[in-house]
Image: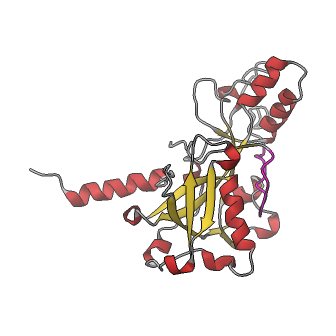
Amino acid sequence: MPLDPNKYKKQQQELKSKRGNTWKPSEGEAGNIIRVFLFGHKVTDEDVKRGFYGKENLNKAQQELNFKVVRHFSVLEDSKRPVFSTAFLMEKYKAWRDSNEESVQEQAKEIKPQTAYAINILDINDMEKGIQTWLCPSTVMDSILDYWNDPDYGDSIFGCKGRDFKIKFDKSAPPAKMYMTKLRDEKNCKAVGSNYQEQVKDLYDPKLRGIFAIDFVQEDSIFAGENGKKSGNGSKAEKGEDKPVAAKKGKTKNGGGEDDGHELFND
């Protein structure tokens, strides 16, 4: 007896929803053709506490292009999973980076903060997969914002009736040249169905953040016990659960490391 197609297609969709249906660019001269979509978000108390928005935006609806992700690798003792950056981790990184000891400087390189931007995209050459989430590097986001800032384009380049971006990816190239991003000629871009806009994810949704990184807890990290053994439950500050580094809006040159747009952690 064959499997029930309706049952397992539904199950597949549930799994995709949980992991965010993430996308990775392919290498090759042909490049990747994608459409970028904006998304809506209503500001919550948690957003304000994490520094994503100011108090004046609480409960207000926002239109967003991306969710900025600053994270560290090699922080957890028993896992390769990345963690979201916090003020505590940034202080540790800077202290190690500025150390006079070469071995400590090498440790700093291991936990160097990496910045990437989560965006909603449609792969024009694989539209059956629908809207996917891409954690794109700063170089790509910088190029997208350059086009957006051009008065001839603006918001018109996004969405169902927008323009496509051609992304060339060369993993062997230096970080600054790993990605080449160009806006396709308007004559080569076709409108897509409104159903794709309906698939767009709110990338500020806490349920989706687990595909990018996990929250930092000091007891699980290489800094466990650094300040002596804690008794009782301790405060959030003692556990390293301090306020994450605030995401800065707009066009930003990344002063730290840069993700290559590949390393997603799926919970």
203 lies left or right of 104: left
Question: Left of 21 or right of it: where is 41?
Answer: right
Q: Position of residue 171 (x, y in %)?
A: 57, 43
Q: Residue at x 61, y 43 (%)?
A: 213
Foreground of the two, 33 or 81: 33
Instruction: Examine the rendered structure and indicate whether residue 34 appears above or below residue 154.
Output: above
Of 146 and 184, the residue lying toward us:
184
Asked whether residue 189 appears in the rendered view, the answer is no
Residue 76 coordinates in the image, percent (x, y):
64, 28
Q: Which residues are magenta?
A: 243-255
For this orientation, the residue located farthest to the left is: 1
Q: Quadrant of residue 252?
A: bottom right
Q: x and y percent of residue 114 in the render?
A: 70, 42
**Residue sitting nearer the eye, 241 or 209:** 209
Q: Is residue 101 above or below residue 166?
A: above
Image quadrant where residue 173 sits: top right
Tell me which residue sits at (65%, 57%) in the image: 140
Where in the figure is residue 207, as x and y percent of width and height? 55, 53
Instruction: Say if the magenta span includes residue 250.
Output: yes
Main SS, magenta region, reads loop
Q: Residue 130: in sight, yes or no?
A: yes
Left/right placement of residue 206 relative to residue 68 reads left
Q: Residue at x 81, y 64 (%)?
A: 55
The mark total stands at 0
Tell me what residue is drawn at x 81 percent, y 24 percent. Answer: 105
Q: Is residue 20 above or below residue 61?
A: above
* Vertical comparison of 43 with 111: above or below: below
